[in-house]
Image (cartoon, grey):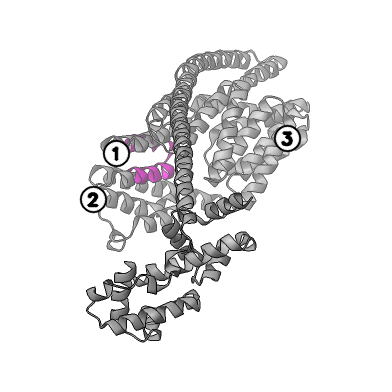
Amino acid sequence: MKRLKKNEHMKQHYFLSLFLSLFTAISAQPQKHPIPDSLKSKSYSYLDDRIYELRKDSAHAAEYLAAYLNKAKNEQNWKEIIYAYQNILHQSPESLRIVYADSMVYAAGKSGDDALLGSAYLSKGIAYYGQKKYEEAYNNYITANHYISKTDDSYLTFKVKHQIAQIKYYLGFYEEAISLFRECLTYFKNENARAYLNTIHSLGVCYNRIGNYGECTEMNTLGIAEGKRLKDSDMEAYFIHSEGINEYFKSNFRKAVSNIESSLPAIRENKDFGNESVGNFYIGKSLWALKEKDKALPYLIKVDRTFIEKNYLRPDQREVYELLIDYYKGKSDLKSQLYYIDQLLKADRMLIETHKYLAGKIHKEYDTRELILEKEKIKDQLVREKYYDIIGIAIIAALFLLSIFLTARHYKNRKFYQKKFEELMKKTPPEQLQSFSQIKGAKTKMLDIPQETVESVLKELEKFISDKKFLEKDLRLSAVASSLGTNSKYFSKILSTYKNKRFIEYFNDLKIDYIIQKLKENKMMRLYSNAALAEEAGFSSTQPFVFAFKARTGMPVHFFIEQINKAQE
């Protein structure tokens, strides 16, 4: 079995070497590197899907990563080049990630796009953060924030905010970190599942550090449940790890050891030496609290080894050296005591320098910039509010002037309507109802129509009106002319000559004059709606009646009825 594992290790080492050689060649001369013909015509989407499927198998993913980058470079598509390097970064060893992050920054610089530049510097910062190089990570976050703040990209804005919150957590500004993480949680919940789960984990860790162990447990429980709902199990080990540390602070030391130990294999597989070191520290402390110092010792020594190899030590882990010094003091091992005293001094120097640098910079460069941005937003809001106030005042003024205009027009119209009403009341009976015998005469000679024909048509028309046939709906010129014993041409000429009106106008006026007489005589009809009056007058619908009434009388129906009522009162 050991030999098999050794062979597997050698095989992985071979594939890793092949992988590194492959990307050295791609970066140097992508156009000369042979890409399988079957992949040259594939879309970015296809290649990306295969890269994702093989994300835990760098050797097999290499071919697709190379094809993606080669395609993007041949097309000089800077956005896809950046994305290609980002994929390579995620698949590459820790030592090469900054190299590919630099390639992303270079490509983003060529594009001149603020969002791409911000994203590239953010990826570089995250790469440094993964190596626990917090100063370099912070500097790249600030540069990323500079570019992203010029865009409207909400996702990148919150991604930077999340990483700044991580730095604040590391520095011990837990309340400030919680505030930022809370903002991120609300945004990422519906935008990015992995970022959402990461934020839940970060909140749980922060709650633990401020002594809110109940809230920490709630976050860890929520994270596991949400991971299952989202079908993303990658974070489950981290929630178990977090809860293990939380159990230590609740003095449940056996449970703490069990939880943390069960989480460490997945964390080691992710090459997350930071959380592995923290896990070892709290397993060691739990065993120490259980008076099992000899069992605790290997875990505490692992924390020191990570500090030596990776220069990583979290502020709360400083205690590891005090425990080790105490342990070897009890063993009267002066050499080991001296060694760990020296390590404690190195750790203090590193922590002081890092904290002094970051604590000053984060408040000066990030928090102050955020305040300035907030100030600018408030100023813009005030300008907008002032603008809206001006618009509002202008609208109010316009409405006021409009109301004055409408009021003036209303009174002017009523004065005009009153005059028309008085003129109308003097016409008794309306001229359309007068006998044609009163208006016959010389006009007959003006028509190119036999006199007997004219007289016959006028006589029949008089009878037509007397029989109230004009109240029929949908009167047509041809039908009325036929009923009068003539044709449309003659009848139109006779109407034009004797009444100076066309057919529609003449019969509409007859209908309106009829309604006017009825309204004068019948109080009940004054209660009718316009639709009912239109029906009474023989109009096919309400609107033609309303138009015809105003055209005939110069006033609306309601005004005429109002004045009739007043006159009779």
Q: Which residue is mark 3?
A: 256
Q: Quick check: marks 2 and 1 in contact, CB under 8 Å?
A: no
Residue 97 is covered by the magenta coloring: yes
Location of residue 268 with respect to 486 vertically, above or below: above
Q: Residues within 10 Å of mark 1 (few under 14, many from 20)?
A: many
- Under mark 1, the amino acid is Ala
Q: Can residue 268 be spotted in the picture?
A: no
Q: Position of residue 126 (x, y in %)?
A: 45, 34
- Residue located at (57% from left, 54% from top): 564
Magenta residues span 82-104
The quadrant holding residue 320 is top right
The one nearer the camera, 420 or 355, is 420
The quadrant holding residue 488 is bottom left
Q: Residues within 10 Å of mark 2 (few under 14, many from 20)?
A: few
Q: Secondary structure at mark 1?
A: helix
Q: Which residue is mark 2?
A: 74
Tell me the number on the disc at residue 107: 1
For the stretch drawn in magenta, what is the main secondary structure?
helix
